[in-house]
Amino acid sequence: MQHRIVVLGAGYTGATAAGRLAKRLHREDVTITLVNPEPDFVERVRLHQLATGQDFKSRPFSKMFAGTGVELKLARVTAVDVDRRTVSVTGADGPAELAYDTLVYALGSGWNDQGVPGTAVHADQVASRPGARRLRDRLAALEAGKPVVVVGGGLTGLEAATEIAEARPDLNVSLAAHGALGDWLSAKGRAHLRKVTDRLGIEVHEHAAVTAVAADNVTTADGRTVPAAVTVWTTGFAVHPIAQNTTLEITERGQIVVDTTMRSVSHPDVYAVGDAALAIGPHGKPLRMSCASGIPMAWQAADAIAARLAGTKVPHVSIRYFQQCISLGRRQGLIQFVTADDRAVDSALTGRMAALYKELICKGAAWGVANPTAGLPSRRRRVVRQETQDHARAEATA
């Protein structure tokens, strides 16, 4: 009987995990089902570009996984029962239930309005493709001179503000940051960021936590009112809520608690990767929600699953950081080099070379998803007998 592997979510992490599993295991021994509501891959790290009218090559999963043995199930996940080992989904044919022996949970995260009054009604976001397309339409309809406020001074906010200001120099773009501009960067990084925002004419409101969003303005904690014909909200991500309705051990944020192989600490048949998981990195710090964390997590999970099914030694590779890559429009960038646990060091790459570097990183990540089995050894492992799997499962839960 084939071992049933179900992967939930086909973002960077889910698609990578599915492809790597297909390369690691014999098709006769396993079935791999990838569940996703959309038929093509979304480059989430480029959604701020989509919002400014840029178009991108379609990457259909049917082409990406052709010949790999990965079956794509176009459906939305509605529930997961980790005790019965089933997943409830709804697709074009209506509700259905999928049974699994191993589950890879990669449902990721979405927009987080932080509960700030008016945000859900009046603000736009670039955390999803529909959100980015809606923002694109709203920006395109704005007349010259209209104000646009980007709320959030993190990586997403910086990229959104600079992209909009460069694409639409006729708009009055401002950025509202909770702290100082780029306060986590090195001195060189902060200086370059300030130089770019000044050159693009972005008005920066520092130490300006936004407490309310209206149709035509935002209000900050210190009482400032900033005009906004369009407000773009980029203050972080919220974990997909499905896991909260399971018996999985999760954090207060809803992330699944995993070990160093991305295996659930409460349910050994479940692996979680990407934004959906709380994994610990160097020096005991949790890995941050990012593509830089998610793809190595997917590699780790897939390799651990394959090893356990084949009865071989499980690899343990420390996931660490090397840099934070920030695009500042199409012609400027910032590569902030960091320690293994993601703290900025003095070294940073700036300017046109940094923009090219970031573009290569984005293209490489997309290529890796679009070619999920490239570069891996061609020898697949055979799955051990089911009794051995059951014994290993019993040991893990003992």
Image (cartoon, rainbow, N blue to C red):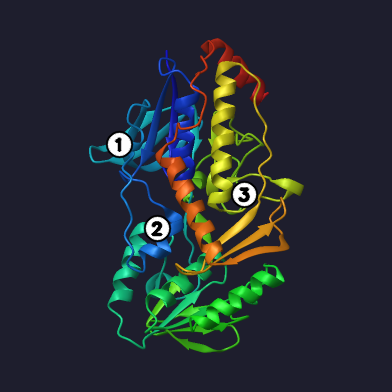
Q: In the rendered view of the protein, which quadrant contains the C terminus?
A: top right
Mark 2–mark 3 contact, CB under 8 Å?
A: no
Per the rendering, the mark at residue 375 is none
- In this view, the residue farthest toward the left is 93
**Residues under labels 3 and 1: Cα distance?**
35 Å
Describe the element under mark 2 as helix, strand or loop: loop
Q: Earlier in the sequence, mark 3 or mark 1?
A: 1
Q: For the residue labelled by badge 3, is the local secondary structure a helix, a strand or a loop?
A: loop
Visible residue check, residue 101: no
Q: Position of 172 compared to 324: left or right?
A: left
| Residue 255 screen position, x and y as percent | 57, 48
Residue 275 % position (x, y): 54, 49
Between discs 2 and 3, the one toward the N terminus: 2
Q: Quadrant of the N terminus?
A: top left
| Residue at the disc numbered 1 | 62
Amino acid type at image mark 1: Ser
Give amino acid for label 2.
Ser
Residue that appears at 48% across and 73% down:
162
102 vs 279: above or below: above
Mark 2 or 3: the one toward you: 2
Q: Which mark is residue 128?
A: 2
Residue placed most toward the observer, 271 or 243: 271
| Residue position marked by numbered label 3 in the rendering | 251
Label 1 crowd bin: few (<14), some (14–19), many (20+), radius 10 Å: few
Is any atom of residue 171 visible in this view?
yes
Alpha-carbon distance for marks 2 and 3?
A: 23 Å
